[in-house]
Amino acid sequence: MAETGKFDPLIHAPNRLQICALLDATAEIEFKVLRDKLSVSDSVLSKQLKCLEEAKYLIVHKRSEMGRQRSWLSLSSKGRQAFHAHVAALKAILGQA
């Protein structure tokens, strides 16, 4: 399966898979927008992001806007490669690759 991709159990968890899919489609997303898209609490999202960040799949940028600090999230190149490999592995499993 090396040619088609590598199944990644870290990414495969439902919330993390959705996070990676959303981040792959854009340069970056603000924390609260991602939270609302997933319909999860701050703590649930934070826990999932921490897993991705520890694996070096996620980059967190903190910015001050209108006096409030906000977190912006993006996939690292390692994270983007891992996500694409995981999607390819899923397609291979389904026989669509």
Image (cartoon, helix red, strand yellow):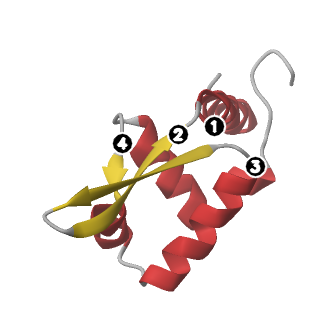
Disc 3: CA contacts within 10 A as few (<14), some (14-19) or many (>=20) = few
Mark 3 or 4, nearer chain start: 4
The picture places residue 93, in percent across and down from the top left corner, at 74, 38
Disc 4 residue type (three-letter): Glu
Mark 1 or 4, nearer chain start: 4
Mark 4 or 2, nearer chain start: 4
Q: Circle 1 sits on which residue?
A: 79
Disc 2: CA contacts within 10 A as few (<14), some (14-19) or many (>=20) = many
| Nearest the eye: 58 or 90 | 58
C-beta proximity under 8 Å, tags 2 and 1:
yes
Residue 84: in sight, yes or no? yes
Disc 2 residue type (three-letter): Leu
Quarter of the image where one finds residue 8: top right
The disc placed on residue 55 is 3
The picture places residue 16, in percent across and down from the top left corner, at 58, 59
Identified at 44% across, 81% down, the residue is 42
